[in-house]
Amino acid sequence: MQQAHRSRILHFLGDPGGQLGEKAYEYFEDGLLVIQEGHVLKIGDAHDLMPSLSPEIKVIKHNNTLLLPGFVDTHIHFPQVEIIAAYGEQLMDWLKKYAFPAEEKYCDRKYAKQMARIFIEQLLRNGTTTALVFCSVHPESVDAFFEQCGEKNLRMIAGKVMMDRNCPSSLRDTAETAYNDSKNLIDKWHNKGRLQYAVTPRFAVTSTPAQLAMARKLMYEYPDVYLQTHLSENHEEISLVLDLFPECKNYLDVYDRYDLLGERSVFAHCIHLGGDEWKRLSKTNSNLAFCPSSNLFLGSGLFSLEKADEQNLTVGIGTDVGGGNNFSVLQTLGDAYKVIQLKKEKMSPMRGLYLATLGGAKSLGLSNKIGNFESGKEADFVCLDSAATPLLEMRTGNCSDLSEEIFALSMLGDDRVIKETWIAGAKAYERD
Ligand code: GUN
Ligand code: ZN
């Protein structure tokens, strides 16, 4: 089954922050994206490709639309959807007051299912087609999330939080149960259709050495699963970690001693790292999730994109809902820009959009499957409306080039600009 989408189309071939300059992206003012069996067959100017289409192919014309690859959210928490935008605390108190009580409810399969529906709806209405997701400590929460992702054919990565200390007893597993539960979930879900598993020790504060050793064992036994955790987000957190692991040189060294660094690993936040930590992340090809909305909302600090670039690190964008106060990767780019301004660094409009698409896919090792419209990639895409609000219509109407329009969309856009979200060539969300 073939179909073709005619629209303005933009996608990235590489990082505009590197040497590629304008060669980093392709833009078609009147483009055609041809899809076969859920995968990209070809992309190009409609004028060139239309004559080669067989007459029975359905051509869907998107008027006043900018078609982009779906957004990739490299760090988000499913069981925190109900406490998004909770007032008044920084990380450690916020966890105690809001996050842990919310996560306790996910022992209930029915509740987890109901919330999974809401969570996935939010992802799709914000144009997020792939995410790296923390579930709760309960295997039921992973089942609820993956069941519904499977039904919608979404490409998602998720895992059960491992947490055996410094949390309420109702949320505590043990090194052994975390291992057994994770193993069962990997056997059940990993590589089932488009779903993949991430071993998920919450952070060094809530895992004993015995549990981190179990995370290592899982990574050895299943070399193609992911590892996700938090790193160097908040000063109180960092000093707790150093107290809990006095033998370690620094925060990252805790994970390093358990062999948890590497190209399948994604570390969220990475705000207050020392030089040795930056180098070690780079040496091990580890990946970073930049979560600006959360870092501002929880008052955690300012991430340095320049330091990550100096070390050639792969960075993706994370909303970190519920520490982050929005599901929109576009809005998160707006916060990213402000963080980078405060750091007196630069992130071009195209760079931001790259990080939200192909860059995110790279940081998840998925750039051979998603992130742009190269032939053979899975056809997950979003249709954006640059005139979604009167303000956007006025502002984007005044833009002199594409980069200015992308910047306006990143600074002013949110779920209102997402007209449609398509998953593997099928429409999964429509705004109107
Ligand atoms: N560190 C440990 N757990 C969490 C969490 O749930 N959210 C954030 N932002 N940081 C964490
Ligand atoms: Zn987080």
Image (cartoon, helix red, strand yellow):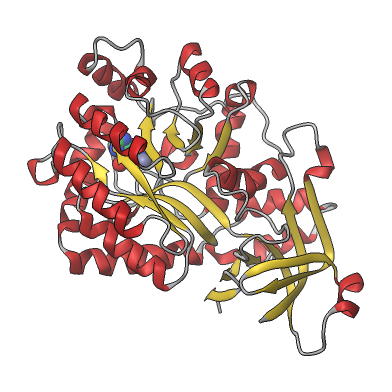
Quadrant of res 349: top right
Residue 280 percent location from the top left of the image: 49, 18
Residue at 68 percent of width and 30 percent of height: 346
Residue at 80 percent of width and 37 percent of height: 20
Any part of residue 53 in sight: yes
Q: Between residue 143 and residue 47, name the one nearer to us.
A: 143
Residue 18 percent location from the top left of the image: 74, 32
Is 425 left, or right, of 30 in this rendering? Answer: left
Residue sitting farthest toward the front: 221
Residue 138 percent location from the top left of the image: 19, 52
The C terminus - image quarter: bottom right
Is 216 left, or right, of 12 in this rendering? Answer: left
Quadrant of res 87: top left
User: Which quadrant of the frame does ligand 2 lie within?
Assistant: top left
Q: Quick check: 21 above or below 28?
A: above
Q: Between residue 276 and residue 178, name the one nearer to us.
A: 178
Is 302 left, or right, of 220 in this rendering? Answer: right
Q: Between residue 316 and residue 179, name the one nearer to us.
A: 179
